[in-house]
Amino acid sequence: MSFLISESDILKCFQHLVDSTYHKDSILLGSGDDAAVIDTQGRQLVHSVDISKIGVHFHESMRAEDIAYRSITTALSDLAGMCSFPSFISIALTCDIDEISWYKRFSNGIKEALDEFSIDLVGGDVTYGELNISVNVFGYPFKKPILRNGATLGDSIYVTGQLGKAKQGLNDLLNKKDSIYCKDFLRPKPQFQKAKELSDFATSCIDISDGLIKDLGDICKQSNVGAELCFEDIPVLNDHKDLTHGDDYELCFTAPCHLDDQLKSQGFFLIGKIVQKLGLSVKKDGSEITFEKNGWDPFE
């Protein structure tokens, strides 16, 4: 299936709803970043919502436990992208499976995620239809929310880990091959510890869910800057296609260049720099790489 319109085209139809002044002064940041930020009696509450649909975000052959866990942790990753930690969630499930054992196994996957990240399930809903999970996540900043619009000229660009493992894992799963990378797709891990470490110095941040090129592109657009990357410095598993597949759930962030030695010693990967010229370029052996697509789009 391929639509003539993109996810971005559809989102623009709703932009007028969030461009105007909010009715409540407590809304500090609305739509447009990884999550919204709400003032709750002096404490900032960070909120996001994520949808996972069969055939789009996960394969029908996956275990119920893995579907539940993956749906929750991919949603939680948006909080990590704001340098925030999770507190509680709610889940809405649409499902047409008529085996009660499936729902019990699905609930076990939820329990695994709740226990691992010390969060609470505070509500939800269930209705009949094609398998679809909507997860609302709520949390609080480690220090302050790190937004996408803070990158400045001369900043260094970093990623927190290797890209492409989930892409390889999905490929192995579809080819019925058991590999060490399958868990990277089935059980993605939001990078909360790394988010906590970089919350002291990052000027912008985003979680890499749709591919590095697309997600870093969002930082550049919202910061009104450009980016230059050196492919040889980017930790990829296979090749340049690892930069556009998505499902990595690592973090991409910018920070002042005088911190380069410190950040590299902490295990962060320096991959490029913020420049004045708008757009994003990736060079390999001195030549610019051309990508077939910028990243994941569920409508393509």
Image (cartoon, helix red, strand yellow):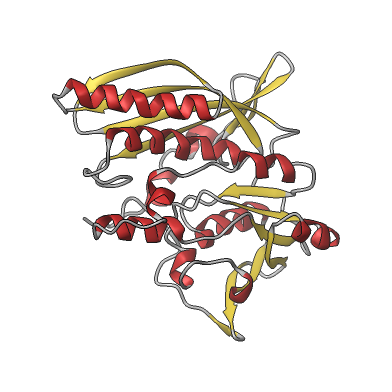
> Residue at the left extreme?
98
Place of residue 134 in the rendered image (x, y in percent of width and height, measured from the top left): 37, 30
Determine the residue positioned at 75% across, 54% down. 266
Residue nearest the observer in this picture, 215 or 17:
215
In the image, 121 versus 34, the foreground residue is: 121
Q: Is residue 9 above or below residue 92?
A: below
Q: Is residue 99 visible?
A: yes
> Would you identify the image quadrant in which residue 108 lies?
top left
Task: Classify 58 as above or below 291.
Answer: above
Q: Residue at x 39, y 72 (%)?
A: 292
Asked if 265 appears above or below 81 in the picture, the reply is: below
Q: Position of residue 73 (x, y in %)?
A: 47, 37
Along the horizontal axis of the image, is 163 left or right of 2? Answer: right
Using the image as rendered, state which of residue 170 and residue 122 is in the foreground: 170
Give the side of residue 142 with respect to residue 30, left or right: right
Counting from the top left corner in percent of width and height, residue 90 is at 44, 21
The quarter of the image holding the N terminus is bottom left
Q: In which quarter of the view is residue 146 placed?
A: top right
Along the viewing direction, whichever of 4 and 255 lies nearer the viewer:
255
- At 59% from the left edge and 20% from the top edge, which residue is drawn? 23
Which percent across, then down, holds residue 5? Answer: 32, 54
Residue found farthest to the bottom? 286
The quarter in which the C terminus is drawn is bottom left
Q: Is there any visible trace of residue 257 in the rendered image?
A: no
Figure label count: 0
Position of residue 296 in the picture relative to residue 254 (left or right)? left
Q: Quadrant of residue 144?
A: top right
Q: Residue at x 40, y 26 (%)?
A: 110
